[in-house]
Structures are given as structure tokens and as C-alpha cells.
Amino acid sequence: MGRTPMPLYVGDVSVLARSLRRTLLDSEHIPSHVEMLNLLAKSAGFRNFQHLKAGQERPRAGSAPQGEAKADLKRAKRAAGYFDLDGRLTRWPKKHSLRVLCLWVLWSRLPAREDMSELEFDERLVLGHTFCDHTMLRRWMVDLGLVSRTPDGREYRRIEAQPPAEALEVFHLLH
């Protein structure tokens, strides 16, 4: 049985290197294979290797099928049209694919590899839209796997992933 390749996207390789170095210096022994997998996953912002693996098993929100990297510029322009000149989401799209692209924009504004309290997360969402439904946005982001939360809902964390090509095009159009 062959192994399925599992990509690991790291936003900042310098942060990864520092985290690994610090952990290895504190270690009293050479990490085993599984320990090393956990170290890499933690350094990339996941809780452990299983958390990373779970995120790979289901398709990422709005991601294109493998081999398809071209962005639909027309859809990206439509998604960008849901934002005002200040970059705030002005209304909730009816089409699921446009909703996902708009949520990627909100995701991109969250701090990477940082835990946020529910209040901090809500404040960021409130500032990012104008139609007064941050709870719906929060729920969608968690359901789509863009953000993780603790079982008690007290802490949230952006899940590090490579945004799909269309989302990157929306980022470009909004900046």
C-alpha cells in the first residue's frame, strides 16, 4: 500500500525553523518519526500531526480539484463586488461558491498561528462586514474548516492553508 503525499503549507518558513530549533534544543533525545511529524505539524500551526492529517482528508473550502490551478476571474470579480471601498463585506452572497471566496478574504485578515478569544474573533468579524451577522460568519468559517475552535468555543485559531487561486485573485482585486 503506497503512501498518499500530504502537502504542508507554511506561511513563514522562518517561524517554522525557529520553532523546530527551539523544540529540538529543549529535547533530551532525538525525536522519533512520529514525534518529528508532530513537531512539524505544530510548527505549521496545527495541534499535532493528526490535526494536520484531518485537515488534508477532507477537501479545503473552495479549493479547486487537483491539477486545476486557474482562477475563474469572472467569479473572483463578482466576489470582490461584495466588498466596499474599505474592504468590508457589504452583503451575504446567495451562491455558495461566492460565499466561500468572501470567507477566504475574512480568513486572510485573521492573525496566523495565534489563538483568539471568542470576543477577539467576533471583533475582527464585526470590523470586516457591514450587515451585522458576525455569528453567522463565525459559524460558516468553522464549518468550512477555515477556523478551528476549542470544544467549549472560547478560543479560535485560523487554520493555515493555501487559499485557492480564485481567492488569491479576490485578494489582489481588493488591495
Image (tube, rainbow, N blue to C red):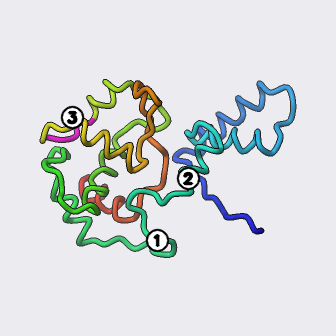
x then y, percent, for residue 16:
62, 40
Tell me the SS state at disc 2. loop
In the image, the segment drawn in magenta is 125-130
Q: Amino acid at mark 2?
A: Tyr
Q: Is 129 included in the stretch rendered in magenta? A: yes
What residue does disc 3 label? 127
The residue at the point 80 percent across, 45 percent down is 33
Q: Is 144 included in the stretch rendered in magenta? A: no
- Residue 47: quadrant of the picture: top right
2 sits to left or right of 118: right
Along the line of sight, the residue nearer the viewer: 123 or 109: 123
What residue does disc 2 label? 9
x then y, percent, for residue 63:
42, 63
Indicate which disc residue 65 carries.
1
Whether 5 is drawn above or below 130: the answer is below
Whether 146 is drawn above or below 3: the answer is above
Classify mark 1: residues with Cα within 10 Å, few (<14), some (14-19) or many (20+): few
Marks 3 and 2, how far apart at CA:
28 Å
The residue mark sitting in front, 2 or 1, is: 1
Q: Main secondary structure of the magenta part?
A: helix
Q: Quadrant of the N terminus?
A: bottom right
x then y, percent, for residue 54:
57, 50
The residue at the point 38 percent across, 47 percent down is 143
Tell me the SS state at disc 1. loop
Q: How many marks?
A: 3
Q: Amino acid at mark 1?
A: Pro
- Residue 27: quadrant of the picture: top right
Name the N-terminal-most of marks 3 and 2: 2
Classify mark 3: residues with Cα within 10 Å, few (<14), some (14-19) or many (20+): some
Furthest toward the front, the residue is 151
